[in-house]
Amino acid sequence: MCVESDGCEIEGCSTLDEVRTLSGSMSPALKSNPDLHPCKPGHKFRAALLKCRSPAAAAGILTFGNVLNYMDRYTVVGVLQDIQRHYGVSDSKIGLLQTVFICSFMVAAPIFGYLGDRFNRKVILSCGIFFWSIVTLSSSFISIEYYWLFVLSRGLVGIGESSYSSISPTIIGDLFNNNSRTMMLSVFYLAIPLGSGLGYILGSSAKVAAGDWHWALRVSPALGIMAGTLILLFVPEPKRDQMGYIKTRTSWLCDMKALAKNRSYVFSSLASSSVSFATGAFGMWIPVYLARAQVVQKTAEPCTTKEICSSTDSFIFGAITCVTGLLGVVIGAVTTRMCRQKTERADPLVCAVSMLGSAIFICLIFVVAKKSIIGAYVCIFIGETLLFLNWAITADILMFVVIPTRRATAVAFQSFTSHLLGDAGSPYLIGLISDGLQQSYATSALWRFLSLGYALMLCPFIIVLGGMFFLATALFFLDDREKADKQLSQMTRQPSTVKVTAI
């Protein structure tokens, strides 16, 4: 028989004698008790839901939500030229959209990390999705006089999305372990490039289909509501360790001290900041840069001469991002798995090599873009593939060196630092440099193209710096992983007496 946690006997819910709770956990069989009563129809429905709450199904739903997370984030970027023309703002002010989004995102991330380590995570995730979906839909109705309100709406969306990015990886980390966890996290982080690319495609396609860029913001909210509902129904709330034996709870201050002393965590977070800087700037400005390149080559007309701006570059860039994201994460997972057979430091070393290789091809984009758009796309393809190799690996590094009970906090603060030092400022900074260069000389189509290219040249240097941080991570990775394993072993062996120290 099966017994619900409230003492209700479920008839015919399993062929095995087992106890199953709503969290999906199982324990040895219980014998029939006369105090148990037959289930009501509602309890039978809940029992049916339990059968669908497998770890694989939960990981699939969380991955779908992460796709929507990034798709919603980059839908605006897919219609960036239309927004710039509609509100009549400069490069720096249009770059402010992403900066405000990321600033609110990173400020809220530590708060959600704290909540995620202490309260029901799937409820927090669902509320975050519902919130950002409603705000995104509402922002599509903001009139031309209120650009500041449109910017504010992006900040509110950032708050909602920070709950998802901070908490969802920790659920997968608790549902799986070892190589299966690496594989599931790789699939989960495929959502970053896939969702980002689909955001460009969705934004440009919806705009063309409706003849109005506002409709780009009215599609993803419906999908977001669906994802939030699926999480509430089918994603379990796993215990925050593999075996469920950890009974001790460290304070938030203790968690922060431990993370600050964890050198692998600190250096990998700095490396993640470099990736965020580059991807934030590229995601915002590369489609605009390529559109200006085609105006210089006289293969396209300026956006000011059309009723709606061309979305070809956004569409192509989005498709490239989807493909390179898939290739990058898969190649990264396979390469790391193979390299682990030769060195235990494989995770940070693979990240370092991929970063340094990516910087070379990203530099070449600005060399060939003036004369060959196809050549620029080839460089983007290779550079992005190498850059995307490290996303899932970075998350796995964190899981290795941080104990389960403080992983949500670790993910949240890694997100905070990577955004603070990365894409919180890079879109606005690139736009500001571009505006400054344009003011130095007479404005022309050629100079608008060149000034943005010169500003974007900052990105390869930041990527090289990130590669250096990954090399530093490799120096301390084994020691920090051993410390985390030792502390976890102590916590699970003597849960009632062990005193947890910050290591």
Image: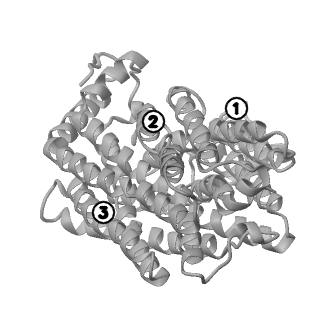
Q: What percent of the width, then of the height, locates residue 367?
A: 36, 72
Circle 3 or circle 1, nearest the eye: 3
Separation of marks 3 and 1 at Cα, in angstroms: 57 Å
| Residue found at the far front of this picture | 442
Near-viewer residue (284 or 20): 284
| Left or right of residue 47, residue 377 in this image | left
Mark 1 = which residue?
A: 6
Separation of marks 2 and 1 at Cα, in angstroms: 45 Å
Say which residue appears at 20% left-offset and 37% top-offset. Answer: 480
Disc 3: CA contacts within 10 A as few (<14), some (14-19) or many (>=20)? many
**Mark 1 residue element:** loop
| Left or right of residue 77, residue 180 in this image | left
Mark 3 = which residue?
A: 359
Say which residue appears at 44% left-offset and 76% top-offset. Answer: 376
Q: Are marks 3 and 1 in contact (CB under 8 Å)?
A: no
Q: Please determine whether, in this image, residue 132 is positioned above or below residue 263.
A: below
Mark 2 = which residue?
A: 420
Q: Amino acid at mark 3?
A: Ala
Q: Amino acid at mark 2?
A: Leu
Q: Please determine whether, in this image, residue 222 is positioned above or below residue 383.
A: above
Q: Earlier in the sequence, mark 3 or mark 1?
A: 1
Near-viewer residue (248 or 129): 129
Q: Earlier in the sequence, mark 2 or mark 3?
A: 3
Q: Amino acid at mark 1?
A: Asp
Quadrant (top left/top right/bottom left/bottom right) for the C terminus = top left
**Mark 3 residue element:** helix
Q: What percent of the width, then of the height, locates residue 170?
A: 47, 42
